[in-house]
C-alpha cells in the first residue's frame, strides 16, 4: 500500500497536487484508493468531482448520542459508511471539524481504529492535509510513507515550507520521507537562487499552468485535466521518479 500526505500553506496548490496525484495513482493501477480531505476548508471533493453529505467531525460530535444498546465502535462504523463517498476507483472521506469547541480528542481512539480498519481495504491512501498537520498529529491514520510539502516559488513560500518541515519533524510523526515540491514556477533559476544554501528535501518544480485557475473557476474536476498540459506532464515525471520502486513492484 502507498500512503501519502500532502501539506502546504493555503493557496500553495496542495489540493490541486493531491487531486492530480490521486489521478496518477488510479491510472497507475492503485485501485481502490482512499482519499481523505483533512483540511477544514474542505474542497478536495470539488477537485475530484464528487459531493459529500456529512463529515467525520460532524459524526464525532454525535458520539454522545449513541444508544445504550449499541457500542460506539459499531455506531461509528455505521455512521462512517454514510460519510464515505464512493466513486469510480476511489472513495472519499471528509474529516471536516467538530461543530463545538475543541477537537476530536475525546473520540480519537475510536476514530483511529475506524480509519485504520477502513484504509486496510485500499491499495493507496492520499490525505489532503491542513497546513498545521493536526490530523497527522492526532495520529488518526496509520504510518505515512511520504509527506509532500507544497510551496510557492517565493522567499516567504519556501520559508513557510521550512517551518512546516520543522513542525513535522518536531511532532515526531511516523513518516517515511519528506519531499518538497515548489509549485507555480515560472523562473527555475530564480527559485534555485532562493533555495541556495538551504538543506531541503527538494523533489522538483511544477510550472504555473493557466489550465488550473480555469478548472477552479468552472468547478471542473481535475480528473479531466488535459493530458498535454505542462503541469500534468511534469507532475507525472516527478511522481514516476518518487515512486519508481513502488511501480517496479506492481
Image: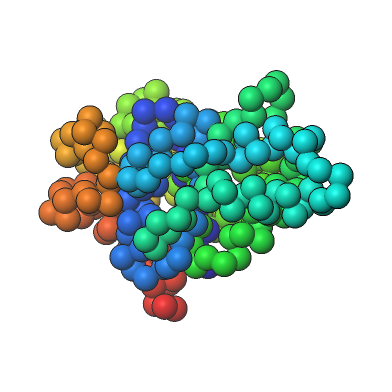
Which of the 4 image quarters holds residue 67?
A: top right
Image mark count? 0
- Along the line of sight, which residue is nearer the eye, 75 or 117? 75
Quarter of the figure that contains the C terminus = bottom left
> Which residue is located at x 51 percent, y 35 percent?
39
Which of the 4 image quarters holds residue 138?
A: top right
> Which residue is located at x 47 percent, y 50 percent?
85
- Along the line of sight, which residue is nearer the eye, 165 or 142? 142
Q: Residue furthest right?
A: 68
Q: Residue furthest top?
A: 101
Give the percent coordinates (x, y) of residue 177: 53, 54
> Which residue is located at x 70 percent, y 21 percent?
101
> Which residue is located at x 70 percent, y 32 percent?
61
Asked whether the viewer can see residue 186, the reply is: no
- Along the line of sight, which residue is nearer the eye, 230 or 162? 230
Give the percent coordinates (x, y) of residue 141: 63, 51
Q: Residue furthest bottom?
A: 249
Asked whether the viewer can see residue 96, the reply is: yes
Above or below, comparing residue 98 to residue 174 in the picture: above
Give the percent coordinates (x, y) of residue 89: 39, 63
Above or below, comparing residue 5 to residue 87 in the picture: above
- Along the line of sight, which residue is nearer the eye, 81 or 186? 81
Above or below, comparing residue 211 to residue 113 in the picture: above
Amino acid at each position: 500500500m502507498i500512503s501519502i500526505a500532502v501539506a502546504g500553506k493555503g493557496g500553495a496548490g496542495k489540493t490541486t497536487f493531491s487531486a492530480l496525484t490521486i489521478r496518477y495513482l488510479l491510472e497507475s493501477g492503485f485501485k481502490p484508493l482512499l482519499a481523505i480531505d483533512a483540511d477544514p476548508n474542505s474542497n478536495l471533493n470539488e477537485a475530484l468531482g464528487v459531493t459529500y453529505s456529512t463529515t467525520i467531525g460532524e459524526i464525532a460530535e454525535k458520539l454522545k448520542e449513541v444508544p445504550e444498546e449499541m457500542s460506539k465502535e459499531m455506531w461509528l462504523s455505521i455512521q462512517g459508511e454514510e460519510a464515505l463517498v464512493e466513486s469510480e476507483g476511489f472513495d472519499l472521506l471528509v474529516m471536516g471539524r467538530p461543530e463545538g469547541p475543541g477537537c476530536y480528542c475525546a473520540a480519537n481512539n475510536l476514530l483511529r481504529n475506524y480509519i485504520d480498519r477502513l484504509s486496510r481495504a485500499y491499495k493507496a491512501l492520499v490525505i489532503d492535509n491542513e497546513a498545521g498537520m493536526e490530523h497527522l498529529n492526532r495520529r488518526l491514520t496509520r504510518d505515512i510513507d511520504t509527506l509532500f510539502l507544497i510551496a510557492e516559488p517565493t522567499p516567504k513560500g519556501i520559508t513557510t515550507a521550512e517551518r512546516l518541515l520543522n513542525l513535522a519533524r518536531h511532532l515526531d510523526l511516523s513518516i517515511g520521507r519528506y519531499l518538497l515540491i515548489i509549485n507555480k514556477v515560472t523562473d527555475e533559476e530564480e527559485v534555485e537562487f532562493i533555495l541556495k544554501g538551504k538543506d531541503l528535501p527538494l523533489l522538483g518544480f511544477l510550472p504555473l499552468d493557466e489550465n488550473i485557475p480555469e478548472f477552479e473557476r468552472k468547478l471542473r474536476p481535475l480528473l479531466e485535466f488535459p493530458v498535454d498540459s505542462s503541469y500534468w506532464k511534469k507532475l507525472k515525471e516527478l511522481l514516476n521518479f518518487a515512486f519508481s520502486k513502488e511501480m517496479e513492484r506492481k
